[in-house]
Amino acid sequence: MRFKEVQIRLGLKTIIKTGLIGSCLALLTACPEYDSKTSVLLPVEGDTDFNWNLPRDVPLPKVPEDNPISEAKFQLGRHLFYDKRLSGNETFSCGSCHLQERAFADGLQTPSGSTGMVHPRNSQALVNIAFNSSTTWANPVVVTLEEQALVPMFGEFPVELGINGDNQDEILARFIQDADYQLRFKEAFPNEADLFTFNNIAKALASFGRGLNSLNSDYDRYVTGDETALSASAIRGMNMFFSEKQECFHCHGGLHFSSASTDRTQMFTNKQFHNNGLYNINGKGDYPEGGQGLFEITGNPEDKGAFRPPTLRNIALTAPYMHDGSMQTLEEVVRHYAAGGRNITSGVNVGDGRLNPNKSSLVPGFEATQQDIDDLVAFLESLTDTEFTTNPRFSDPFLTK
Amino acid sequence: MKSINLRTILAAGVSFFSATSVWAHGDMLTERYQIWGAASLTGYSNSVVAKNEYWRIPGLLMGGEALPISSGVQLDDAYLGGFTRLSDQASVSAKLGIHGGGDGHAATPALMQLQYAYQLPQYDLTLDAGLLEAQFSPIATHHASFALFSEAALMADAFWGRGYHDKGARLKWQPSSHWKFGLEYWNGEAFPATSGEKGGARDVFVQYQVTLQDWWLHAGSYVHQSKAFQRGDARYTTGHTHGTVFSPLPDDVRFSGDSDLIGLSLGMRTPSFSGMRVKVDYEVASLKAKGSVFDSTRSMDYEANHLGHYLTSSVEYDQHQLSYRYERISLENTLTGTSATILGDSANLVSSDSPIRQTIQWHWQVSDGFAWRVAMTQDQSLPEKSQRYSVGLVWKETFLSGR
């Protein structure tokens, strides 16, 4: 009796088991691909083969539809960038103010152009500029590198390369007569009848600029897994940089160390301008004439002293600092932030920048020991990418010829 | 405890014939009024995620109330419920509850249900309206103090954020004791829907049950459709106060689009052989979502094709129940667009792991109002496998009832 019951139970269990597993299997096989998987479908892009000097997994920059990038354009742009024939008096090139060994800044407080006219602004480093959401220190209007390239060529206030209505044909003729450029322009703009135009020159220069990418610093090595790449001091500095106390990352955050950056995966560009408390002339928030930042374009008094947060990549190579080159060292910059602004007690620019009414609330000042300052500086120095400043791809082709 | 024998309900395994629905909706209640309380208290040996971290299953857009259990003694939930018949046709029931869960989250009591039910016996119809608990699936809502296991089904956590309750209306047609047809229409506040013009949800379900020579059999099926507009993962941002410092919140990535759920459930319970019964519950559901996933600057097209199922088998003997639950979900995602890599990453959608969870439990109904449960869970809902033990106490009490 007992025995029989056990048997019944066993039989039952088997029936239940098989029945259930059977129905499960029937159900499951009815749903194909029962294992988890993720398919990532990226649109086919023509320019992923271009040597961007970027790691594979980094989103590429936006490129205007009418100027797709190519190696030929990049190389033409590189030649033009370093070619003094691109200035009215053949004494200046873009490379005169943008030197590779200085991450394409020039080491001067403010440069002079080909005719000796002084530029009111410090020469900017050209580092990951393809990712900037606007160009130059404070201009929300000139957005593409193509538009920007025309400024140093044709600008009158100040004159940089000194190209104008009187000499422009002569300048184009210099390139038309050059057999090497004949080839290079043809290669760069294969289907165009009118090759030698300033538009095409701007397109080539912009393409060169888009290739100037630097993501190979000690810091990058550290974040990709090499724990020995940063010193203990730099690591402390990094933690401060990304903390809510020092606030740096709010404006200098992201892959390119500027919140004013964008890439092709983004629908919206994030144009940003901030006042970090450098001046406060007359206590009314004024900056020196000619250096009023965004205000010069918008005319809005609240925009006085607002500038685009620059990238901090290779920052150790690009002294002096700020839009007017008014700070000599990184230590001075860090002390400026620790103080929450700059207090100028004598001279024409007298005024307490800490109290500038337009100053961003993200520059409140913070307590810092000498060690903290050294640590932050050590971190900023770890953003230097010497592969970038020595890469022959970005160098002056006329020197090596 | 005159008309409802709690023990029977529990022994029957509340999962199918969800005790909550019996309690809450009053379909079968003959009482005029009733006030009851229930609570579940469990001590867990481990947390699902490390302290101050977020439970995000790779490959899944989570939301709703799907908070992870954490180590230590935890109030899974506690309820105070009431029911009163207003007339032969109409009744009102309400449920105030606390849902525990989530490390560092202080639970606050909330109204879980406030339902007005109107019956039209001549047509076999019932109309429910108000703040309702969904009935489309046996696990549509989870109440640790009524469910067999203290932890909600993985599939419910994954597909509808654990407990589905929302403002809405339900029409039920029960032409016989075997068949139940239901139509639920929701405001859309419950995950995976959002409310408002571009949101909303609805479902239909059919359930069949029969007892043949002491074999109890059950089958049910449902289709649930929802629309979401800019739906985020609100699990860690709303309705909770952070007791401790959390890691920075995950990126605010949102979803707009449609989610369609189709499910099938089967259950059976054998007659008693020498006082022993076997009970098996099975449910499978497919979730298809289609729309876009985006953050403040990026957007991509998104398609999900997920499948989840669980199998619970129990052996009952006297007041004891030994159960084993196997759960698995497979997550298939298709991300399309220039930002697919980046967004896939910040939305945590890139995965080839299929979450699996297995639970063995001993449940002992000590008395009508008290039960113990001791469980061991092997959790592979995250890429890192973990194991935990739990000991819990379930309490229920009818404070007041009358005919």
Image: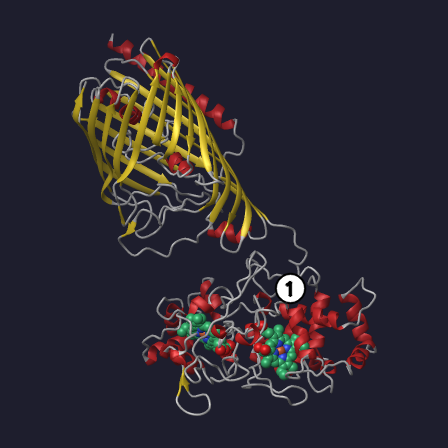
Q: Residue furthest bottom?
A: A347
The residue indicated by pointer 1 is A51
Q: Is residue A78 left or right of residue B329?
A: right
Give the percent coordinates (x, y) of residue B334: 55, 43
From the viewer's perspective, is residue B395 above or below residue A126?
A: above
Give the percent coordinates (x, y) of residue A195: 80, 69
The three-letter amino acid code for the residue at tag 1 is: Asn
Which quarter shows the C terminus of chain B? top left
Q: Chain of mark 1?
A: A
SS for callout 1: loop
Q: Residue at x 70, y 77 (%)?
A: A397
From the viewer's perspective, is residue A75 above or below residue B135?
A: below
Residue A98 at least partly seen: no
Q: Residue at x 82, y 79 (%)?
A: A173
Give the percent coordinates (x, y) of residue B142: 32, 33
Q: Residue at x 28, y 22 (%)?
A: B315
Which quarter shows the N terminus of chain B? top left
